[in-house]
Amino acid sequence: MFSPRMIEYFEKLKIPNNYYKDKSYEYQYWFRSLLQKIYSSLIFKGIPDSWPRDFFLDCLFLLGFVGVFKSERFGDKEDQMAFQPCALAGWDFYYEPTKSIVSNPLFTKEFTIHKDIEILKLTPDYTGIIDIIDFYATKLAELSKGIDMGLINAKMPIILTANNQAQASSLKAVYDKVQSGETLVVWKDETDQFDEVIPRKDPWETWTNDFKSTYIVSELLENLKTILDSFYTEIGLPVAIEKKAHALDQEADFMAAQSQARIACWVQSLEESFMHIENLFGLKLEVEFARDEQEQDDTDGSGDVSKRDRRY
């Protein structure tokens, strides 16, 4: 289940409760998993030590923006900078917000944007990425249910029919012996008095499942990987791909540009916000692609990045 803290975040950030209310365990698992993967796609630098990073990331990615302002009481000890989720109000000629309202049980105030507060936003439209997570988490949750169902069905390859209760008990005893590891089990139906005169061909009737046509777990697992790869590509994380001889450099470049489009939009929006924050308060913040850090780790002594079959 979502933790009480996560649900509290949703309520405080005014996120519609249909994203978490009455959701399945599979959905909640994938929602948290994808959200944490998104957190790893960007690396923030210059964040004041007093800012709790988990709360900062939750607000920024789920709500889409936070207000950054000075506060002697709640701000960082070094530069008195603080942040909080906020509501936007007032609109200028270009329909940009002019006011920001911070409402916290310990602190409530209306600020003027570009005067005593700046808005740090992840996306140009002041929205978070919860729709992306919900889109993929819904599909992955349904696939997970299908995989669980397929694995359960695989545990029952044979259905046996008994003529009476005594025979059913005998069959259960035989099954228990087989499950315990016995390789040879001799069974005799003591309830049939005509066995010595008219022997039966089969001691019981069976129904065997055709697993080659009904076992689809492997296909579901492949679909699961495909959807995860699509998610990784959308948020700019590296994806392992099968190297093909006929793949063209132009095609690889197109795939790389496509995978970087959304995260590049986030970085551009964040950098514009950083510029306003630095101009007003002098606080210098930075953000980098997580893949840039990975490429530096992959660099050998010559300065060349080792070639790997990865797509961004």
Image (cartoon, rainbow, N blue to C red):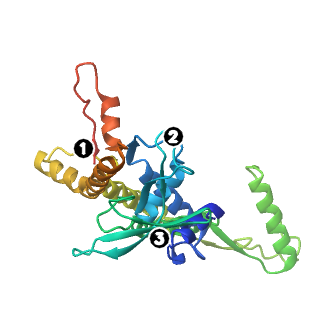
Q: Which structural element holds mark 2?
A: loop
Q: How far apart are marks 3 and 2 (CA)?
A: 36 Å
Q: Which is more N-terminal, label 1 or label 3?
A: 3
Q: Which is more N-terminal, label 2 or label 1?
A: 2
Q: Quadrant of residue 220?
A: bottom left
In the orientation shown, which residue stands out farthest toward the top? 301
Query: Residue 245 at x, y = what percent?
Result: 17, 43
Q: How crowded is mark 3: few (under 14 residues within 10 Å), some or many (20 or more)?
A: some
Q: Which is more N-terminal, label 2 or label 3?
A: 2
Question: Which numbered dot is residue 138?
Answer: 3
Name the mark nearer the viewer: 3 or 2: 2
Q: Which structural element holds mark 3?
A: helix
The residue that label 1 is drawn on is 243
Amino acid type shown at disc 1:
Lys
Residue 218 seen in render: no
The residue that label 2 is drawn on is 49
Q: How far apart are marks 1 and 2 (CA)?
A: 43 Å
